Amino acid sequence: MERLAIGCLLWAAAALGAADSEIASEIRMATSLKRKPRGLANASIEHGTGKEGSSHVIRETGLKQLIPFPRTQEGAQLAFSIFSEASPPPVTNFSISVKNLCTINWQWSPPEGVNATCELWYYSQLGEEKVISIKNFRTEEVALNERICLQVRSQCSDASTNPSDALQMCTMPPEGDPESAVTRLRCIWHNLSQMNCTWLPGKKAPPDTNYTLFYWYSPLEKNLQCTNYYTEGQLIGCSFDLLQGNVSGSEKIQIMVTDTAGTVRPSYNITWLNSVKPHHPVITALFLQNDSLYVEWESPENFESNCLVYQVEVTDSQPKKYKVEESKCHILQTPQELSEKSNAKNCLVINQVERDAQYTVRVRAKTSKYCFEDTNLWSAWSPEKSIGQKTDPTFYTVTLLSIPVAISISTLLLLLYLKRLKIIIFPPIPDPGKIFKEMFADQNEDTLHWKKYDIYEKQIKEETDSVVLVENLKKTSQ
């Protein structure tokens, strides 16, 4: 852009017939060396009247001649571009300071040797966040878990494309081993009254570390220390009172967790106060009337009527969830069971329900988009309330098992009864042939018995005769 301005100046000097040969030669030299013409650092635009009429001119101390430009919009822009797009010097006395826990303040002084017509603006960049302002300082709330750097440039207009060289100022990172710092540091604002912060110990933190939590928010004059420490499994936590009225107008709260002995690296956190977890609602009325189920509950305290959204879960055979965004209960005919102040409470009416079933109801809440930016933190479920008669499932089980057993026993008894009844009604007819068969069968058995007996006696007799013969032979031989 500076080269373009010099080129425009050279064209203007040649076209308009600049009388001063010294200025013309300087402009040509500056153009060839790609620099601004010397002697124009303190140039200023003036309005004058010459032979050719009114004109914008550039006056430089030490030069007798004026460079004339026609008094037109193009002439004014050309004259102004000669020095307005020039790079001013960098800022001076750049410093940095940290207050509270995570509040960083950068401050600097205007550059030296700037032309009086240069309206100074400052371009500062912190990470991806860029700010252009006329203020010579910048304050940010940043978690100091790493090195934080700010770059500052000066320029002669808010839309300048030719700022000065950048100066950078950084914070020092926290001291200590990074793996000794706590992890998963998270803070949740409960019910606009209490802040709960939890964390996990660092990998290289000593097992007997005594952690300390400090916090600060506007308008506190100094950092405060948390005193109510607790454990939830592996998590370590601390809670402290934080009422909404005390932080009115504040958007963030600064947190730092370290240890009393200084052996672990400090860990910082910036918690936005637009993320709130409400307390659970309380069911105040539950009843059935005219085939409709009425549920009424009270909102958690500390919240306005339009700042909460509710979810009602009604369970009979299967859970069903209903979303309730309106804060008041609108019923055309208010049942007697509802209190007189029902119009100021929250309720849900479910029509066409079965009166013989049992219903279990519970309610939870979260912040609405009308009051808070973060609307993803649901409260815990309220204590359950039930209405109606619940059928005992054991009765159905026993009944189902008893039916087949009873049918089986009845069938067996019926079969036995029918068989006995058949014998009584239809007695068996005697069979003569069977009688004769049995008689002959008995005779045959007797005959076989006799035959077996004769053979047995004959065999014994032969054995006896043989023994007698042997005895006689022994006597004879003697």
Image: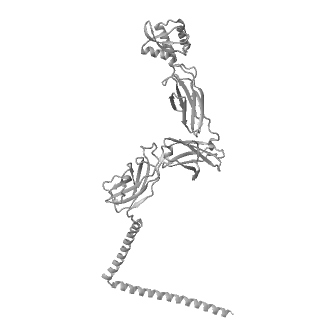
Quadrant of the drawing holding the C terminus: bottom right
Position of residue 54 measured from the top left corner of the image (x, y, whole percent)? 43, 10
For the point 42% across and 87% down, the residue is 442
Position of residue 287 measured from the top left corner of the image (x, y, whole percent)? 36, 60
Tell me which colouring the rendered structure shows.
one colour
Between 249 and 181, the residue placed more toward the observer is: 249
Name the image quarter holding residue 399: bottom left
Q: In the displayed structure, does residue 208 sit left or right of residue 10? A: right
Between 462 and 290, the residue placed more toward the observer is: 290
Q: Is residue 388 above or below residue 69?
A: below
Residue 249 visible in the shown view: yes
Position of residue 166 measured from the top left corner of the image (x, y, whole percent)? 57, 26
Q: In the displayed structure, does residue 408 sit left or right of residue 374? A: left
Q: In the displayed structure, does residue 337 sit left or right of residue 467? A: left
How many circles with numbers are drawn on the protein? 0
Q: Is residue 113 above or below residue 430?
A: above
